[in-house]
Image (cartoon, rainbow, N blue to C red):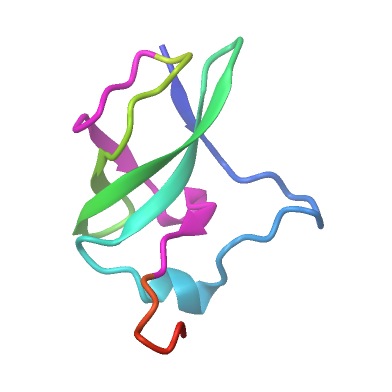
Amino acid sequence: MWTIKDPPKVDTFQLPNEEDIASIVSGSCIKLIFANEHNAERMWVKVISITGKYWKGTMENNAVFLPIKYGQLIIFKPEQIINIWMELDEKGE
């Protein structure tokens, strides 16, 4: 069994701000922390639904230590997001 962890509250771990979270749309890739009692992994999830308190996405990679597979449905809260994959334009911005 595994859970999605809330981000750590430390100064050395930069999290997305409210503006960044508000910019997420269906198709965006975000990173979450998945853990069980022995291991934790940070993995990418593609957002497929943004409604209410709980959002939905699908795994974009396979876990090494946890029983989570590519394409698996994931339900999470936006405050659990630790990173957002930002596409750059031609200028690198």
Quarter of the image for the N terminus: give it. Answer: top left
Q: Residue 29: where, in percent of width, then height? A: 33, 55
Name which residue lies at 68% across and 60% down: 14
Comparing 41 with 7, the one in front is 41
Query: Is 24 placed above or below 4 here?
Result: below
Q: Residue 44: where, in percent of width, then height? A: 39, 43
Residue 88 visible? The answer is yes
Comparing 71 with 23, the one in front is 71
Q: Residue furthest right?
A: 11
Q: Residue furthest front?
A: 90
Q: Residue 19: where, in percent of width, then height? A: 48, 79
Location of residue 71 by image quarter: top left
Query: Is 84 placed above or below 37 here?
Result: below
Residue 55 visible? The answer is no
Name which residue lies at 36% across and 71% down: 87
The range drawn in magenta is: 67-86
Name which residue lies at 25% across and 68% down: 25
In magenta stretch: residue 75: yes
Query: Is 2 placed above or below 91 here?
Result: above
Comparing 68 with 55, the one in front is 68
Q: Residue furthest bottom?
A: 91
